[in-house]
Image: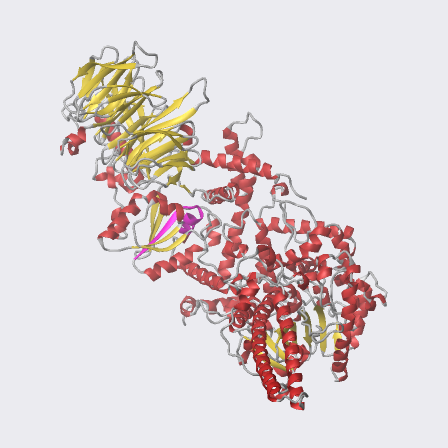
Amino acid sequence: MLRWLIGGGREPQGLAEKSSVQTIGEEQIQNPYTELLVLKGHQDIVRFLVQIDDYRFASAGDDGIIFLWNAQTGEKLSELHGHTHKITAIAPFSSSDVTEEKTDLIITASADRTVIVWDCTSGRQVQKVSCFHSTVKCLTVLQRLNVWLSGGSDLCVWNRKLDLLCKTSHLTDAGISGLVELPKNCVAAAAGKELIIFRLSASNNGSEGWNILEIKRLIDHQDNISSLVSVNDLTFVTGSHVGELIVWDALDWTKQASECNFWDSSVHPDVQPEIKLSQSPHETSVQHLTSDEECVFAAVGKGIYVYNLQMKRVIACQRTAHDSSVLHIEKLPNRQLISCSEDGSVRIWELREKQQLPAEPVPTGFFSMWGFGRANKQANQAAKKMQENTPVYFLELVGDLIGHSSAVQMFLYFGELGLATCSADHLIILWKDGERESSLRSLTLFKKLAQNGDLQLKL
Amino acid sequence: MISAPDVVAFTREEELEDDLYREPPLPEEYSVPLFPFSGQGANPWAKVAGSKFTRDFILISEFSEQVGPQPLLTIPDDAKVSGTFDLNYFSLRIMSVDYQASFVGHPPGSAYPKLNFVEDSKVVLGDSKEGAFAYVHHLTLYDLEARGFVRPFCMAYISADEHKIMQQFQELSTEFSKASECLKTGNRKAFANELEKKLKDLDYTRTVLHNETEQQKKANDKGYYTTQAIEKANELASVEKSIIEHQDLLRQIRSYPYRKLKDSEFHPYEPECALDRADVGSNQDPTASDPTEPGETHLYTHVPSYTPKLIKAKSAKCFDKKLKTLEELCDVYFFTQTLDQLHHIERTFRGDVCYLLTEQISRALLKQQSVTNFLFEDVSFLDEKPPEKQYRGCQGLGQDAIDEKCSEESLAPKVVISLGSYKSSVECVPIKMEQEMEDPEEPKMSESVMSEHQENLDYLDADIKGSISSGESIEVLGTEKSGSGLTKSESQASLPVTPSPQAGRSKVGSRRTVSEDSIEVLSTCPSESLIPEDFKASYPSAINEEPYVDDDEGGLRFTPRLTPGVEDGQDDVSKQESLVQVDAACCIGKESPNFLEPLPELGQKPCEEDGVVRIPPQPYRPAEQGLRGGFPSHDGLSGGLLPYELDSRYLTGSREVSKGSLDECSDSTSYISSAASTCSDRTPSPAHLGCAAGDRHRKRAGQNALRFIRQYPFAHPAIYSLLSGRTLVVLGEDEAMVKKLVTALSIFVPNCGAYAKPVKHWVTSALHLVDFQKWKLIGLQRAVSPGGVNVLHALSRYSRYLSILDADSKTLRCPLYKGTVVARLADHRTQIKRGSTYYMHVQSILTQLCSKAFLFAFCHHLHLPISEREPEQSVVNRRMNFLKLQLGLANEDIKIVQYLAELLKLHYIQEPGQGGNPLLRFDYVPSFLYKI
């Protein structure tokens, strides 16, 4: 296509021929997103999207502004100003106190070393804390205990009213990059290469008092821990910068399994040569982890890997799922997986069970006649390659969303309402199912007609 | 022998077609007799060929107190336009029918001269010998040096087509009122300035005189006054009296209610006042004036420094002095504004009356299509405040309030006209109508006014008698003054008011046939704001009197209006008619009319209370009556105006004519009838009133589009892309070429809302997603620079949202199109030659699409389940069936209608205040590369 444009008149040659990245043609039957809304407002990279309730979400980024949006209409609900530097962490904190009515709060931390609690309904700043010695890099809400934690160079525990309940001593210079809640009032904090387990315990002398105790330091990772996720009450998973994936027991904090050779081509004998070219740590870094009950999905470098907890091995992978690093992945309820990447695209994958089709070799000449036939071929090839490795599953590309002109930082899946993606191009895009939107509009239309009394035929 | 194909190859296309058309001669018995005047380019609607001027023009004349009636200027200011037409003679005519009393002076019981704020009078006048008919708008301007301080002027719109004048009376009246208002505002300002100067002079003179008197007193101590001293004292006294008089005049002129001109352009510095805007053109109550009105005072107080002069006791009288020119009389700024307005009028009313009327009708209809009209119409002109709005405002005082009674009330004047026509005398002309204005229901109130009129009439009578005795007989066909007061006037009372107009009409006919008058005043209307709504409907009848003297058909037009019951019946008929019409136009015969939106009927009663169906704009009423009456009488002797049901016929007509016309491809202003015909319709009619530029643009776009569909075999998929909402990027190096293509294609782009068309003619930077949301047609520069590569990268990245037309290599990359609609829209073998015609063709097909989209979007059962348990799938099936079977759409055409329907939905559900987020809808469909 590009060559056709530049060359002016030559038949478009498939981009996929040269690149190993799987592509899908323009015909995407399974891709439901046929309508989009561009939400403008941010002045800088948008890094975080967080869901507030069924229809609202907040976005935040390097411009220090937090926007609240209506996911259905794309309407900007409010604009929260208060931070002077970029936002480093954001967490929703919905309280369900019996005494009060439900209020939706969000907590934001910024590089200006403040944390602000906002009321989403009124769009006002509830309280601001600015007693931090370092930037708060992560925020976690422990709904059960009705407290929230902030992690920077130390770990602080706060209650709803923003009283500092307790804090640890200075931990590391690098600071805590990630927090995950574990059973028995424990939390796991990733600080550099170490994984530190803390336990919160009610103090003896006061009703509101809490103590935080460091219980254990796990130093199994070779490099900085880049992501951690809790799978269920029994397990949590961490991934490091050099591509190690460790499955931990959430109760006794022992290593259940580890996988550290995702990227190693020797594991997969018939790996495509392109991958070997540069094995920089960046390419093997575990950027993001997500999980369902059975599997952990890891975004490693440009690829996506599906690790089965039962089988304790990678059951499916897409080594070059994107042209560039995958930044965020999410598992959808319908066996689909969405990934977004620095290359500015969002891709929808489906985890399929391998059908033992007689893989008929198709002459490439046939496909190159039709620009859109190539995707199938690629899929077939990918499937064929995994045959020897006996994965029962494979990831098939069912659609891609192209809209952002720069890295897609994160996305938020809203179920029926669609998908919100945020990007370094300062935009948020709401992707929607066109069919559904159309029928919703019809519904609104007839409601409005009835309201106006226009439904009756005037004679 | 040369074979036939060779010959064909060398003939021009047009000639070939001409031959083809001429070739098979019809047998004599089948052939239709030719229109007697059908020469090359002859206009079948041209009725009067006797006029001496080539096209309509505007004449401004003055009744000069020194030389009598004289023409001042014409618009357009071109000697060719008026031709051999005797302007002096015609000025005399039009100035001699000025009914307004310009009484200024010392009224009995008042010590000071009094300014009369005279309403303009509006008269329609015909001169059958000259073949000229005119709308004449009389106005008076104030001049301190003039006799009685007034200078009578008139502006006349002169046309060879009396129907045009009559049909467009309302519009002309509105527009001329604006011009007149402008002149008068400037004049008041200038007059006030003049008065101030005069006062300063007088003041100075008084001081001088006073000093002299004092000196004389001192000089002579004899104890008695010399004659000289007495003279001086008298002089002083007279100066003082003069000062008081002038101060009073100044007070009067300042207290004149400040008339807000509707077009704020006249007063850019003046604060807007929405309420008063409606008062334009209507008479105002001088008693309600507010001397401290900010605008007015501001206007008048701005006086440059002035050194007073001594005034001689007796100034030279009359004839040796030079009268001020019109420009001096009313301030240069206002004068130019007025000229602009008059030029605007000239442009607006250019062309044949049927063209104007069709345009007005379609505009009125379009305006009522509030749900769909934004798609392909130029919304700006729909939004532009139409003249009738003002009338509504004025009439609102009476009409909206009276409601039920208004129809009965308004019957009276109509009878009056027809009766007044054979009475052949001048009716009383009201000067001040304020009271009536306020209380149309209470005729008693106007009696005092009436008596005043009576007084004034004496003057007039004398005047007119004078003109009659001078050998010119004037027949006044109608003089209206609306309101029920008129019926009670003495002159009327003396006649039996027959409710049947037919009786009156026949009398009129007989009377008129024997008359040899050369000047016929067809109607006068002192204050258009007082014309009742229904009255306007009678203009056509007034026109048609002569042709329809024995024609019952014509008479029937009246009768239904006389009784409200019948009127209802007629409305129903008209409603049905319009329903049927539109139905047919939609090409949806099968569709149950229940799905049709309640169509806004033209002939709706004004009083009807209705949320959706708005009262039709009334100036179109004459037209619409013609529309109604036109059908039955069309076969008969009508000869008259009218193929209102134009559309296809008109298109073919113009196509035929265009074949003969010389330059097909030029964008220049060659028009249908430019070749011949002495009639007024020689000049082009703007497609839309007052926007000739838009018309030209449209024509050029149509012409370019025509060329595009002929040149590019892949025009269909390109147009399909535009109609289905897929952004089309025209890529090229040459800006002019790209822009031309964009212009050509822009006529196919549906609007997304009530904004400008989503068309961007020229972009040089890389495109982003946001651009595709905003623009549906983009001209893009292909550059060789590194930046250019970025541009192309962006294109390839977003290729799924785009169709790309490469203007340089003549390729198109876009989805496949297999439908039929676009084939009709853009047939490369089309016979249409002219841009404007093709534009109309496109509009008509797009309108059909719109109506389909409307049906699709607003059919309840197509989108929502009928019963609660109905599965979604069956609704989907029903929807598809409807599109395929009921709307007869095939393949990709469905997508077009779906897209348009989606736009309609969005437009409808959008809250008025909100701008709404622009959506980008797209499909995942493969694209193909088309080459020439």
- Residue B729 belongs to the span the image colors magenta: yes
Frontmost residue, A112 versus B520:
A112
Position of residue B918 relative to residue B823, above or below, is above
Q: Quadrant of the N terminus of chain B?
A: bottom left
Q: Nearer the viewer, residue B454 or A222?
A: B454
Quadrant of res B320: bottom right
Residue drawn at x 54%, y 54% is B383
Q: Quadrant of residue B121?
A: bottom right
- Using the image, determine if residue B46 lies above or below residue A353: below
Front-lying residue, B298 or B877: B298
- The quadrant the C terminus of chain B occupies is bottom left
Magenta part of the protein: which range? B716-732
Residue B584 percent coordinates (x, y): 61, 50
Look at 19% across and 17% down and name the residue there.
A258
Can residue B162 be seen here? The reply is yes
Residue B612: give x, y in percent of width and height.
62, 45
Left or right? Give the position of B264 relative to B468: left
A178 relative position to B290: left or right: left
Q: How is the image coloured?
A: secondary structure
Q: Nearer the viewer, residue B611 or B537?
A: B611
Residue A287 x/y as whole percent = 23, 28
Q: Is residue B286 magenta?
A: no
* Whether residue A310 can be seen here: no
Tally the marks: 0
Q: Quadrant of residue A164?
A: top left
Q: Position of residue B620 (x, y in %)?
A: 64, 59
